[in-house]
Amino acid sequence: MQTTQFSQQTDAHLVSEYISGDEKSLEILIYKHKSKIYNFIFSKVLNRDIAEDIFQETFIKVIKTLKNGVYNEEGKFLSWVMRISHNLVIDHFRKSNRMPKFEASDDYDVFQFITDNSPNAENNLIKDQVVNDLHNLITELPDDQKEVLNMRLYRDMSFKEIAEITGVSINTALGRMRYAIINLRKMIEDNQILLTH
C-alpha cells in the first residue's frame, strides 16, 4: 500500500528521501522510469543485452552521484538520467569503434554536393572517404554542436528528443545544428576536402 502511495510522490521528493538514506525511494524512481529509459537505450543500440548493461550502468552512475551529494538537477530527474544514458550509449559506440551508418536527413544533407548519380565501386569508395573525413571534422566542432550533430545524424533522434536530453529548447538545438553545419562547410573548404571527384 505504501509503495503505491509513495509512487505518487514527485521525483524531487523521492531523490531527497533516497539521499536521506531511504533505499526504497530509489527502487520507486527506477520502477517509475524504467520503461522510458530502457526503451530509449534499446532504440539506439538495438540489442537487449547491451541495452540492459547500459541501463544498469546508468543507475550505477545515478547512485554514485546521489551518494556523493553532487546531484543538483532538482525537478529534472528524468532528463538528467536520460542524459547519462545518452552519454553511455555514445561511449558504447565510441569504445566499439562502430559508429552507426551515416544517414543524412532533412535539409542537412552533407552529400548534396555529390552530383554523380551512377553508383559504382569508385564512387562508393569516395563516399566512404567522405564519411571518414566528415567524422574527423565533426570531432573538431565545439562540444555542444558535436553533440547535437551526433544525436541527429548518427543516432537519428528528433530535435524534440535532443532538446529533452540536452536540457535546452528545441530552437537552441536547431541553432546548434545550424552552426555545426556552417562550421563543417567552412572546415570542408579550409581542408580542401573534395565532396565530388
Image (spheres, helix red, strand yellow):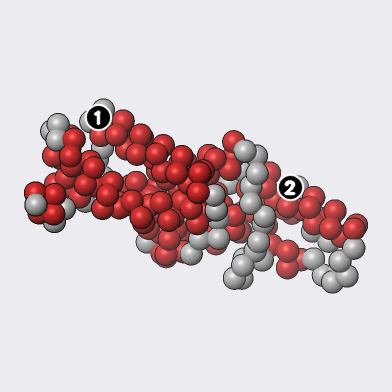
* Left-right relation of 143 to 130: left
Q: Where's residue 117, x and y in %? A: 84, 71
Q: Where's residue 183, x and y in %? A: 61, 54
Marks 1/2: CA–CA distance: 41 Å
Say which residue appears at 78% left-offset and 52% top-offset: 128
Say which residue appears at 26% left-offset and 28% top-offset: 68
**Few, some or many C-alpha atoms within 10 Å of disc 2 (few <14, some 14-19, many ≥20)?**
few
Marks 1 & 2, CB-CB < 8 Å contact: no
Say which residue appears at 44% left-offset and 55% top-offset: 40
Dot 1 or dot 2: first in sequence order is: 1
Q: Secondary structure at mark 2?
A: helix
Quadrant assignment, res 136: top right
Q: Secondary structure at mark 1?
A: helix
Q: Which residue is mark 2?
A: 132
Whether residue 7 can be seen here: yes
Q: Which residue is mark 1?
A: 67
Whether residue 192 can be seen here: no
Viewer-proximal residue among 138 and 58? 58
Q: Amino acid at mark 2?
A: Asn
Farthest-out residue, top: 68
**Few, some or many C-alpha atoms within 10 Å of disc 1 (few <14, some 14-19, many ≥20)?**
some
In this rendering, is residue 68 above or below 135? Answer: above
Q: Quadrant of the C terminus?
A: bottom right
Q: Amino acid at mark 1?
A: Lys
